[in-house]
Image (cartoon, helix red, strand yellow):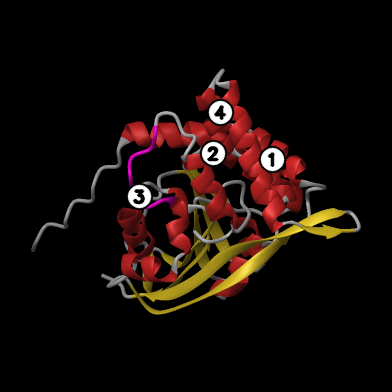
Amino acid sequence: MESPTPRPVPDQGIKDKHRKLWALGDYGAVAREVIPSLGPILVNEAGIKPGDYVLDVGAGTGNAAIPAVAAGASAVALDLTPELIELGKLNAQERGEELQWMVGDAEDLPFEPGTFDAVISCVGVMFAPNHGQAAAELARVTREGGTVALLNWTPEGFIGEMFKIMREYQVPAPPASPGPPMWGHEDYVASLMDGLLEGLVSHREVLTVNRFAEPDHFREFFKTNYGPAVGVYQGLGKDIERSAALDRELSGLAERYARSTEDGMEMDWEYLLLRGSALGS
């Protein structure tokens, strides 16, 4: 019998950096106040039903895992950042839902092949550095014929543009590589999943965000609460001019997307929904 092919060992330095990045600010506020509807949308797209065993990868504070349990499934919520897991446990307790929480790496999932009926990720796995390895892991732990379903920001949408802006201000400059929003490009994800999933279907949708009164309100909320934005500003340190320039660009981005409402403004943030069936090993 041939020995199984060893999986690449994730770079621990990168993992530590990502873990600390997502612990910055208050991602729980973002999940709770800005994107709470995305988790239930993904659960519905995945067709999760009572009795399913579900893994939520990059689960954060449980935005998709908790609705999966509410739909009757048993679920494991896995995330790299312990602080988010602890917030997720409190969220589940407040909603009266029970599920398993686990600190773990999307590129090295601690499960046997074919463990889950469905594996989902709501703007989570897209932030794993090694896209190919993360895609392989999603499929590996899904049973043959089981569902892999993803919801990711698109590179052309609001969050994709925000990451493009922030990338220009990162210190040190990041290495050239496909950014997280590439997980929101249909052809790119199809190439990642080639030979892993079949019957891929995808469609683009928008999340209408009406949490912010005006563009500067959005900017201040994200630079205070959203880990990647907090990290960029921290990296700029005492460079007042660069920090002010980033302020202007983020407010300008929100202004370009904004529509006036009676209560302030609203914006449409584009995302990609994608699902397919695992081919099995």
**Circle 2 is placed at which residue position?**
228
Q: Dot 3 corresponds to which residue?
A: 107
Magenta extent: 173-179
Report the side of 96 relative to 18 (left or right): right
Q: Residue at x 91, y 58 (%)?
A: 262
Measure the C-alpha gap from mark 4 to mark 1.
15 Å
- The answer for how far apart the CA atoms under marks 3 and 1 are is 31 Å
Three-letter code for the amino acid on which mark 4 is drawn? Arg
Nearest-to-viewer mark from 2 and 1: 1
Between residues 159 and 127, which one lies in front from this camera angle? 159
Q: Residue at x 71, y 36 (%)?
A: 220
* Secondary-structure class at tag 3: loop
Reply yes or no: does residue 176 show up in magenta: yes
Residue at image position (51%, 52%) is 124
The residue most toward the left is 1
Residue 83, picture quadrant: top right
Q: Which residue is mark 4?
A: 242
Residue farthest to the top, as pictured = 238
Q: Earlier in the sequence, mark 2 or mark 4?
A: 2
Q: Residues within 10 Å of mark 3 (few under 14, many from 20)?
A: many
Examine the rendering and report whether any part of residue 240 can be seen.
yes
Q: Amino acid at mark 2?
A: Pro
* Label drawn at residue 42: none
- Distance from Cα at disc 3 to Cα at disc 4: 34 Å
Task: Name the N-terminal-most of marks 4 and 1.
Answer: 1
Label 2 secondary element: helix
Give the alpha-carbon distance from disc 2 to disc 4, as whole Å.
Answer: 16 Å
What crowding class fits label 1: few (fewer than 14 Cα within 10 Å), some (14-19), or many (20 or more)? Answer: many
For marks 3 and 4, the one nearer the N-term is 3
Badge 2 local density, few (<14 within 10 Å), some, or many (20+)? many
